[in-house]
Amino acid sequence: MSLVSRWNSKMGILPSFSLPPIKTCPGRSPFCGQFCYGLRGRLAWVRLREIQEANLEASQQDDFIKRMGREIARLRSEAFRLHVVGDFYSADYVEKWVEIASSFPDMIFFGSTRSWRVPSLESAVEMFAALPNARMRASIDFTHEDRPDPGWKVISVEDDGVSCPHDYGWVQDCSGCRRCWQSKVSLRLKLRWPGGVRNLRQIPLPEEVAK
């Protein structure tokens, strides 16, 4: 089974790799646990969950770097999205991606991570983000009291940054924007909610999430 996925409504044809939500997200906030988009809609389909679980198992194997390298070598894409769902869950896993990305200097590896909040992963994640062909942003939401170091650009939910053009229908998909991997600005996403997009500040949050 292929490790690389292609096509969803936002990414378009850009290749990506995802993992199970929550269980691979050690830096998640209480907000993440309740409002994670990976727990809803298409991303929660049984088949996609099976793919995410299979990817997690594959990522723990000794041949992961070789398998992923073979698949990426066949791609014709300027960019590769890491973790549409899921995150860097261990230092060993991050180091595997450092080796993979270093082998493809002409491809940009982009995405966001909350593992900047995890002391045991901080140095490994920063090492990956420092690669010349990596465009990683620190993921945050408006409930965060902690913030990443100033050197990080962020991608937020209803917080800091320039609005994502796709959220407003200004582009059909990520391929028509490229801001995530070509721009150095911080970006802001709207909360995707069943039935539409709402302003999060109009939604009463449980006390433990609002802290």
Image (spheres, rainbow, N blue to C red):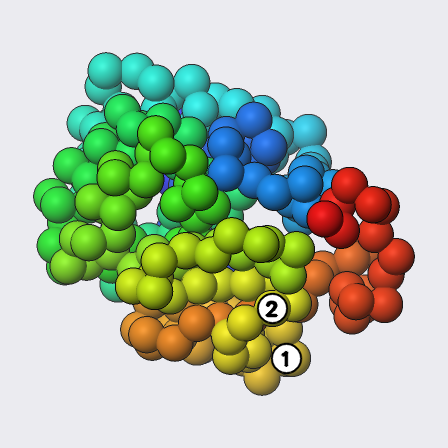
Quadrant of the image occupied by residue 49: top right
Q: Residue at x 43, y 77 (%)?
A: 177
Give the class, few, some or many, for how many residues have Cα within 10 Å of label 1's Cα (few <14, many ≥20).
few
Residue named by callout 1: 169
Q: Measure the C-alpha gap from mark 2 to mark 1.
A: 19 Å
Which of discs 2 and 1 lies nearer the camera? The answer is 2
179 relative to 142 in the view: left or right: left
The x and y percentages for residue 151 are 29, 63
Residue named by callout 2: 159
Q: Which amino acid does label 1 sit on?
A: Gly
Q: Residue at x 34, y 29 (%)?
A: 120
Q: In which quarter of the image is the N terminus?
A: top left
Q: Residue at x 15, y 59 (%)?
A: 132
The x and y percentages for residue 77 are 28, 59
The x and y percentages for residue 152 are 34, 61
128 relative to 39 in the view: left or right: left
Who is closer to the viewer here, 83 or 160?
160
